[in-house]
Image (cartoon, rainbow, N blue to C red):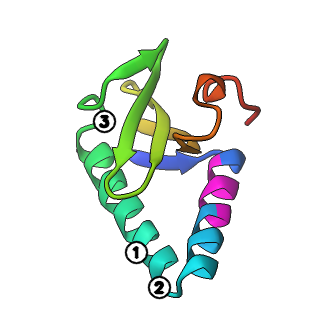
Amino acid sequence: MPCQIIFSTRAAKDLKESFEWYENLEPGLGVRFIDFVDSVLGIIELYPESFPRKKGEFREASIRKFPYLIIYEYSPGDHTILVLYIFHSHKRPKRKYSRKR
């Protein structure tokens, strides 16, 4: 059964800012970025435990062709996925779990 995906305020902001940055860099690139994010979210939705736990209950899924990670928590009891961050993996990677939601 597919899970419900919920975006934290921070993840929604990360996604919007990343889209805008890529779209300003080259028209259409932001849309391509969103397409890759959607593809990974589709896999997470169907197979939420297929991505490794990295710290506590945090799981990470990388976005192909872009240096980003989708960091999320999965609650199997209620079949929900909370996307915490859309994290640029080259920007302060040691701080990825300490960011404010």
- Where does residue 65 sit, x and y in percent of width and height? 34, 58
In the rendered image, residue 37 lying in the magenta stretch gets the answer no
Q: Amino acid at mark 3?
A: Pro
Query: Residue 84 appears in which quarter of the rendering?
Result: top right
User: Do callouts 2 and 3 mark residues in contact (Cβ within 8 Å)?
Assistant: no
Mark 1 in CB contact with mark 3 (< 8 angstroms):
no
Q: Which residue is mark 1?
A: 32
Quarter residue 61 falls in: top left
Q: Is disc 1 surrounded by few (<14), some (14 to 19) or many (20+) residues within 10 Å?
A: some
Q: Are marks 2 and 1 in contact (CB under 8 Å)?
A: yes
Q: Secondary structure at mark 3?
A: loop
Quarter of the image that includes the C terminus: top right
Quarter of the rendering occupied by the N terminus: top left
Residue beneath label 2, please? 28
Q: Which residue appears at 32% of the width and 44% of the height? A: 44
Numbered badge on residue 73? none
> What separation in Å lies between label 2 and label 1 (alpha carbons)?
6 Å
Mark 2 or mark 3: which is in front? 2
Residue at 24% from the left image edge and 46% from the top image edge: 46
The residue that appears at 53% across and 83% down in the rendered structure is: 26
Please determine whether, in this image, residue 53 is positioned above or below residue 99: above
Q: How many marks?
A: 3
Residue segment shown in magenta = 11-17
Residue lying at the far right of the rendered structure = 100
Q: Which residue is denoted by mark 3 in the rendering?
A: 48
Q: Real-space Cα distance between discs 1 and 3?
A: 23 Å
Q: Is residue 21 above or below residue 40?
A: below
Residue for point 52% across, 38% down: 82
Please report whichever mark, 1 or 3, sits nearer to the chain's N-terminal start.
Answer: 1
